[in-house]
Amino acid sequence: MDSSASQTPTVSQRDQWMVEHRVFQLYDFFGGLPRKAQSAMLELQRENHMEYLIKGLKRLEPSFSVLDANRPWLCYWILHSIALLGECVEPELEDNAVDFLSHCQDPNGGYGGGPGQMPHLATTYAAVNALITVGGERSLSSINREKLYMFLRRMKDPSGPFRMHDAGEIDVRACYTAISVASVLNILDDELVQNVGDYIVRCQTYEGGIAGEPGAEAHGGYTFCGFATMILINEANRLDLAGLLDWVAFRQGKECGFQGRTNKLIDSCYSFWQGGVFALLQRFYSTLDEQLALPHSGEGDCTNDSRKTGLNASCPVNLNSIGYNFIKQPAETEPLFHSLALQQYILLCAQDIEGGMRDKPGKGRDYYHTCYSLSGLSGCQYSSAEDEDSSPLPSAVMGPYSNLLEPIHPLFNVVLEKYYEAHEFFAMS
């Protein structure tokens, strides 16, 4: 065999080198600037981001027609990004958003990707989060919880997990979107939870991350969805948390951002999907220590009576209080990833100075990456805070302190203030 052929770089290697080259060029340029210019380069371009977001909320270009089945997602991405910036939307635009999402609500429960489209768990999650982000009685009361609960019951497969839509695929996304919506709307019960944990445990791979379905490859988005779901159903200690921590820690690359899978390129959206896993793990560090102290004697050793030894260590468990109790529990350790490095990647490499965020240098901005880059940036900034009521120290915020965003609830990815309002509203309903 010709030895030169074996040294020919693969497409993946060439792509990786190209990304590294572009990122390190930016970092080298930044490092050569005087302090004042560096500070300006690290500034979050709030006004430009707001202009970009409001424009998208009012009117989208014809090219967005390819996202016709994702219109509640566009509402959520834009509204959540605005809320993260601590800004408000004028009442007319809020009313328009509520009216539009009401037209996406199916008469038999759930939300479709647009008016008249079939209800789907992903767009149901997006619509509910968007309505929570708008807030207020009109927005929150527009959700038909009784019909939505029946939709969730129809999507539940007899084996335990959920389908994304009628006759649709079963995967970890479906489990998370169903359980997340049920939890935040105060309609989560044992029938919805039954055997969901068994399915997600089977999706955790030998690498430590969680795949979309049993036998597939571990992936950042599915890992967040799977772990968050296990927390919300009080079964997180059934997972191999040490393996999970190892896997997600190694997804932060030398470019400072996160990749979604092993040997893949970094992408700013994983600032939340992977970075968010660390925000959850920080509150489970004692459980992780307990697992490490146990002798390994085969799969399933830590699964018995898992519902009795979960987050609240009590039985029976009020499933609908788990999300609220979780955020009230202080972090048990310092950040488990390089928070400032990730903030550097978001601000220098993902930020478009004209507004919006992009995947990586050389890519265009979009609302998806704006939402999850800002969500990840918020998670970084508050990763060292003592509790949910504490503001981060200036040393935890890369760039000027004016970069500080609103805190999010790490299980639902809605601004914390909006979560509290929704929690109180639905608890009283």
Image (cartoon, rainbow, N blue to C red):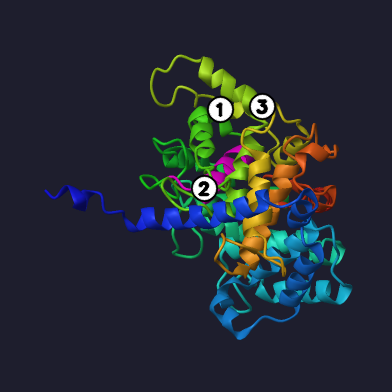
Q: Residue at x 41, y 38 (%)?
A: 205
x and y, in percent, of residue 160 in the image: 48, 46
For the residues labelled 3 and 1, the Cα–Cα distance comes to 10 Å
Q: Is residue 139 magenta?
A: no
Tell me the residue that label 2 is attached to.
220
Disc assigned to residue 315: 3
For the residues labelled 2 and 1, the Cα–Cα distance comes to 24 Å
Question: Is most of the magenta stretch helix, strand or loop?
Answer: helix
Q: Circle 3 sits in a helix, a strand or a loop, which is it?
A: loop
Q: Nearer the viewer, residue 73 or 103?
A: 73
For the residues labelled 2 and 3, the Cα–Cα distance comes to 31 Å
x and y, in percent, of residue 336 in the image: 62, 32
Disc assigned to residue 306: 1
Q: Residues within 10 Å of mark 1 (few under 14, many from 20)?
A: some
Rendered view: 138 above or below 413? below
The magenta span reads: 218-233
- Residue 215 in sight from this viewpoint: yes
